Amino acid sequence: MKNIYGALCCGLALLAFGCATAPESEAPAPAEAPETPEVQEVQEVQAAPNSKASVTTKFFAKNKLGQTVMQYTLKGAGGVVMDVINYGGKVVRLYLPDKNGESKDCTLGFNDVAGYETVDPYFGSIIGRYGNRIANGLFVIDGVTYRLPTNNEPGGIPCCLHGGAAGWDTKIWDAVPFQNGDTVGVVFTTTSPDGDQGFPGKVEAKVTYTLTPENVWRIEYEAVPDKKTPINLTQHVYFNFNGEAEGTILDHELTLCADKMTPVDAGLIPTGEITPVAGTPFDFTTPHKIGERVDTKGDKQLEYGNGYDHNFVLTNPSQNGELAQAAALYDAKSGRYMEVWTTEPGIQFYCGNFLTDKMVGKQGKPYQFRGGLALETQHYPDSPNQPNFPTTIVQPGQVYKTTTEYRFGTK
Ligand code: GLA
């Protein structure tokens, strides 16, 4: 069964992504940042002669503390264009060509920092120190109990979510854009002090975004703590291949290369079990429309999540640092297609069940319930409290290193 499934997933990769060609057409110029008296000069950085790729830097906005947030536009030689900011490393806009070569912004986000500072469900953000939930905000290392302030309470049960109220998604990172021929990117670095959000140890972190001419967005995470501490970094980009604020993602077809998942309790905390997906609405080992089974009556897991909001356990996870396929996403209407490859053992599939029309997107249109989805590569939630999950504890001086790729195309 394992082998057949492995072959299926691989087959899909070759068939679908191998056939996807990068459309020739140019992506539209990204929307301008709102007018502000502080607008700084647009800078072309290290432009490579004869390359269609480029990186430009400009003022984005000020945050509520009056700090300057900069925007980096990565224009890929293959047609993908992304606007990222040094506030939380957020992907503000992501222009993906469709099967006719027409580009649309396919990620959820805001035009200003205020949106991110008020109702933000982690749109496009780097997540740290710990992706997803830690039960009660508590864990023990070497007999010492660490108490993290809780910032989330699904089902009325408090937990620490995504590294706490002032997690790495709220930091202004140091950012250095780069271009090597047709490859462009930004290196984000930051220092998280000892005790940041209750976590032990100072952590030096580096997250590199690279956009390749093949339309691959590679994310490389590195972190070095000076004390034993849990680290679990991810990216919380939301996709909607119909375009942002253009309906729901229920007609997107999803494949997850995962034959098991980690069920949760009413607080969305894993119970510690690792259960097979076969015969349940969680079986995405072959492509299924997200809307097909999301509201299956009587399924306790879907009830707890109000839809899909679960960690899936990869069937054939990465070996020796090689990337393994975790997921594929396809929208037949636009032809947009994506694969997710990672060195991580799990992936959180969240279908936007907390999104509401109180969140108004970049076109001034409200977002809808299930108007975007996230595929967050990660170690399993609450691992510091789950002895049978792969450990997330990093030793002092040890280099935490993971890589994830979102590979965009059409078919
Ligand atoms: C993750 C969680 C969800 C939700 C979102 C952010 O994906 O699993 O429950 O908290 O982040 O809104």
Image (spheres, grey):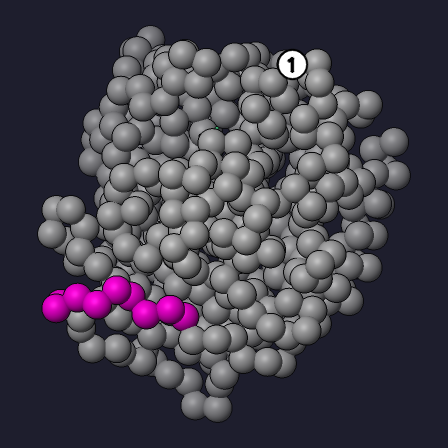
The image shows a total of numbered marks equal to: 1
Does the rendering let one see residue 403?
no
Q: Vertical placement of 152 versus 251: above or below?
A: above
- Whether residue 345 sits left or right of residue 289 in the image: it is left
Residue 168 x, y percent position in the rendering: 31, 41
| Residue range of the region highlighted in magenta in the rendering | 30-38
Closer-to-camera residue (300/142): 300
Q: Main secondary structure of the magenta part?
A: loop
- Whether residue 410 sits left or right of residue 217 in the image: it is right
Image quadrant of residue 286? top right
Residue 3 x, y percent position in the rendering: 86, 37
Among all residues in the image, which is located at the extreme bottom?
50
- Whether residue 232 sits left or right of residue 111 in the image: it is right
The answer to if 410 sits in the magenta stretch is no
Name the amino acid type tagged 1.
Lys
Closer-to-camera residue (249/324): 249
Residue drawn at the location 25% of the way across and 28% of the way down? 197
Closer-to-camera residue (117/75): 117
Q: Vertical placement of 77 versus 297: above or below?
A: below
The answer to if 35 sits in the magenta stretch is yes
Identify the secondary structure beneath mark 1: helix
Mark 1 Cβ and ligand 1 under 8 Å apart: no
Residue drawn at the location 70% of the way across and 53% of the way down? 330
Among all residues in the image, which is located at the extreme top?
143
Q: Circle 1 sits on which residue?
A: 300
Residue 28 x, y percent position in the rendering: 48, 75
Residue 409 x, y percent position in the rendering: 66, 64
